[in-house]
Amino acid sequence: MARITLETLRHAYMRNPRAREDFALHSVDIEWEDGGAYALLGPSGCGKTTLLNIISGLLRPSEGRVLFDGEDVTRRRPDQRNIAQVFQFPVIYDTMTVRENLAFPLRNRGVAEADIAARVAEIGTMLELDDMMDSRAAGLTADSKQKISLGRGLVRQDVAAILFDEPLTVIDPHLKWKLRSKLRELHQRLRVTMIYVTHDQTEALTFADQVVVMSAGEIVQLGTPEALFERPHHTFVGHFIGSPGMNLLPARVAGGRVTIETGAGDPGHQAGAATEVVGDTAIAVANPAAGDGPAEIGVRPEFVRLAGEGEPGLQAALVKVSDTGRHRIAETRVGRHTVRLLVAEGQGVPEAPRLVLDPARTFLYRDGWLAGEAR
Ligand SMILES: Nc1ncnc2c1ncn2[C@@H]1O[C@H](COP(=O)(O)OP(=O)(O)OP(=O)(O)O)[C@@H](O)[C@H]1O
């Protein structure tokens, strides 16, 4: 096992990259602790696979260094790095039995036969493959084949890390949940560094102790699932994590005072009388609002509530209330902007509600980043 450090990595697939958009990865700096369970989360095309392939050595970065326990491995080939990688689709030998497939990575490295037999049996049991150990892989379902792939990734005990690239894509939805919990349990037993790539927030949040969120070739936050929820470092994290995501409203800072720009006075604004917001509304935020200029306010629907009788609040207009099964969500307009909030079962929402944003959970963002926070 190893601590993996990525130092000022950049990668471009094209020759002579010039513009920022020519790079698939921009200046990635991160340290993966030895034995950690990480999820690498981000939308399609943000650079997750590129990052994973740089760690495993399938790809050499255009710039920067990869260190394992402080040792520079940037120029080492995959087979010299001791990394196990599980891909989206099964990589197995169809003509071999399940047992032979699982044993293969160990035989390849000259592990003693008695040790192979014990380890293969253990992994087979963990993945519930016991009753098919002597069947040929060719005849098995896609689910079972992918379980073998997972097993081949997990079977070696000497690896620096195991990398999973969307490994449950081909798995049936009900089995997906089970396997994800299984992987988490295996991590707790094996304590090997695991990096699990996904674009699915549920998958990331249930698997990992630490989630690395990527957007457009950049890491925008590394934190626990709670930290990503409670204090998003970037508006992208606020929006991408959570269902529904964070409310974002254009704002302005002047002399330390933060006001929401409701857009109510804009010529294009078609609000009815009840929705009209007169002027801009001062808002209390949790982080420093230093420096005048344009900004954004972010607050999650969980931290917006209806004002009580006579309590001041942000004037809004109700658009609709929907029930997702898990929550009731009220969608409102504040001037030109949408603000969603969670409302309790049976709680009435007036046509012209006033909204209170929890000042401890309302943040100011500048150019997308949480204001006043070190990156
Ligand atoms: N072999 C390649 N040649 C050229 N461009 C590539 C290559 N592989 C990836 N890219 C580009 O690099 C960027 C990052 O791709 P990457 O596959 O790393 O993203 P991803 O987050 O893993 O996406 P997905 O979830 O769709 O796999 C994308 O713009 C992609 O088009």
Image (cartoon, helix red, strand yellow):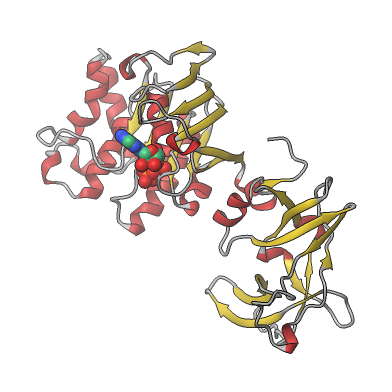
Query: Where residue 42 appears, x then y in whole percent?
Result: 48, 46
Q: Nearer the viewer, residue 72 or 46?
A: 46
**Dividing the image into 4 quarters, which one contains the C terminus?**
top right
Query: Where residue 333 appears, x then y in whole percent?
Result: 67, 76
| 272 lies above or below 20 | below
Residue beneath the point at 43% across and 14% down: 73
Residue 100: which quarter of the image? top left
> Is 44 placed left or right of 8 in the picture?
left
Residue beneath the point at 27% across and 37% down: 149
Residue 82: which quarter of the image? top left
Q: Nearer the viewer, residue 172 or 22?
A: 22
> Is 110 placed left or right of 46 in the picture?
left
Query: Where residue 213 appears, x then y in whole percent?
Result: 54, 43
Residue beneath the point at 73% across and 35% down: 374
| 361 lies above or below 348 | above
- Ligand 1, seen in the image, is in the quarter at top left
Query: Where residue 33 appears, x then y in whole percent?
Result: 56, 26
> Is 234 placed left or right of 219 in the picture?
right
> Is 249 placed left or right of 285 in the picture?
left
Residue beneath the point at 39% across and 13% down: 75
Q: Is residue 186 visible?
A: no
Number of disc labels: 0
Q: Is residue 260 visible?
A: yes
Residue farthest front in this picture: 267
